[in-house]
Amino acid sequence: MELGAAGVQHIHADLASHLTGTADRLRQWGNDEPLCLAGPFHAVYGTFGFDEKLVELEDRPIVAEIIGKEAEAIVYLYGACNRALTYPEICRSEEPTFHDRFSNDARVPSILERRSFAELTAANEIDVAAPDPKDYLAKYGQYVLTLFHSARFRRLLSEPARRECVHYFGK
């Protein structure tokens, strides 16, 4: 399935480079195979902050065929997340409600889903921040620092992800 990510501009490079960087980071942190397989596909349905779609939602079964149902479910959760509504929930609740921007549904994901979401969120944001952390924080700091400084969010992360978050985002 040719997705065309190399031809899509992302913040510091093309989308293919960002997807690969995110996936590489997930592998370096020692994540399980479904999460690592989700990494290079994490933005195929677009995201709350990046609405460029490489694949339509109707093609979810095709993505699941390629990377597996568990990995595709992670990709969907990540892409569907309404961050404006969900991030505050993550910061204030041990069992946060996730708001789906595609369906407008809301549900409390399992702890495994929340951990996968947090790990993928950290890998994604660090990959975006890495080329120029000061510029990243100037542009997006308000958006993510509350989340990344939240004890509830950090408890969802692996130790390698937590360390790298502290390196890039402080505290």
Image (spheres, rainbow, N blue to C red):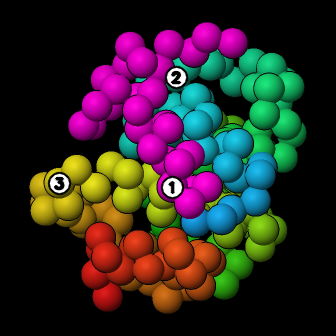
Answer whether labels 1 and 2 touch (C-beta < 8 Å).
Answer: no
Image quarter of the C terminus: bottom left
Give me the residue at 59% from left, 75% from top: 157
In this view, the mark in front (3 or 1): 1
Q: Of marks 3 and 1, which one's residue comes earlier in the chain?
A: 1
Q: CA distance from mark 1 to mark 2?
A: 22 Å
Residue type, numbered disc 1: Arg
Where does residue 8 sit, x and y in percent of width and height?
37, 19
The extreme front residue here reads 28
Q: Of marks 1 and 2, which one's residue comes earlier in the chain?
A: 1
**Helix, strand or loop status at disc 2:** loop
Give residue 150's quadrant in the image.
bottom left
140 in relation to 56, above or below: below
Residue type, numbered disc 3: Asp
> Magenta part of the protein: which range?
1-28
Which label is found at residue 25?
A: 1
Give me the residue at 69% from left, 24% from top: 57
Give residue 116's quadrant in the image.
bottom right
In this view, the mark in front (1 or 2): 1
**Helix, strand or loop status at disc 3:** loop
Where does residue 159 sit, x and y in percent of width and height?
56, 81
Q: Is 115 part of what is drawn in magenta?
A: no
Which label is found at residue 34?
A: none
Q: Which residue is mark 2?
A: 53
